[in-house]
Image (spheres, helix red, strand yellow):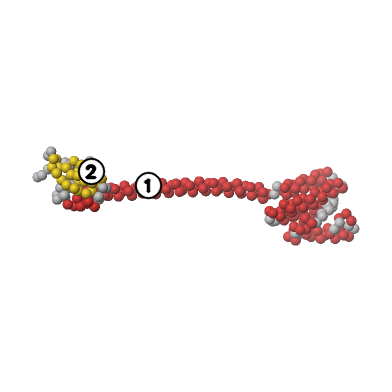
Amino acid sequence: MDFNNRDANQVAKFDSGWQALVNSPELITKEECVATDVSMSDFNFETVIKWFKVCIRLGDKIPDKERDLYTLNLMENMKKSTEEFFSSSQLDYSTLGKIENTFSDMFDELVYPSDLWRKFNSSEKCSGSDDERDIWNLQIVALISIILLLLIIFICVCVWCMKLCKIKKVCEKDCTYDRGRYCCIDENNCPECCEYMKKSGLKFEKTRSELGQNAGSFTTLGKKKNISLTSKSSG
């Protein structure tokens, strides 16, 4: 509709239907917002402002790919309406100033939509949260690794202590202790000890008497070692 060539009846009819749409914003479509050439006057400027505010709200629901074109068309309509209005309005300066500020705020809302800051803050917050979450995850993994390592060390120490205690229990009565090891002086004197030594990889080879001391040699893990042993006193 050409707003510059409308008679009074057409204006009244259109303004009446337009007012009904503004009062029921759910009936306004985005196509009407960008296709309707809105003519603002001293008598309908409040309705026009409501109209554009509804259209701005509709823009928030449009996908990002379509929103840019919609925003440009809506801003073009607003620009044209305000230029015609301010060039012909007879309202006082105070009212015109308020109207100008209102449209300025609406233009700012279109150029800098509220969800832009919300998305930016959300993205920034999510990034920070992800970093913090990664740090916490690394700390948890490190803590679990340390606990597992300590547990493995503890188990190894326990096994070693149990083995040592068993050797002491079996051999301390029938064997000689030298340099932290229990060894048989004579295989016949301590069969249980020697049997355990054999099972443990300590293979008894022979006994001999030299310089008043008994000495035995055995191999540990396939490596031959000679250890001097102090003889036991015979009752």
Q: Label 1 neighbourhood size at 10 Å, few (<14), some (14-19), many (20+)?
A: few
* Displayed quadrant of residue 3: bottom right
User: Above or below — where is 34 with respect to 100?
Assistant: below
Q: Are marks 1 and 2 in contact (CB under 8 Å)?
A: no
Q: Could you tell me how far apart the alpha carbons at marks 1 and 2 are, in whole angstroms?
A: 33 Å
Tag 2 residue: 225
Q: Identify the residue at horizontal 53%, vertical 46% (top origin).
A: 132
Which is more foreground, mark 1 or mark 2?
2
Q: Label 2 neighbourhood size at 10 Å, few (<14), some (14-19), many (20+)?
A: few
Q: Identify the residue at horizontal 29%, vertical 48% (top origin).
A: 160
Which residue appears farthest toward the left when viewing the image? 235
Tag 1 residue: 150
The reply to whether residue 86 is in sight is yes
* Amino acid type indicated by mark 2: Lys
* Amino acid type indicated by mark 1: Leu
Q: Secondary structure at mark 1?
A: helix
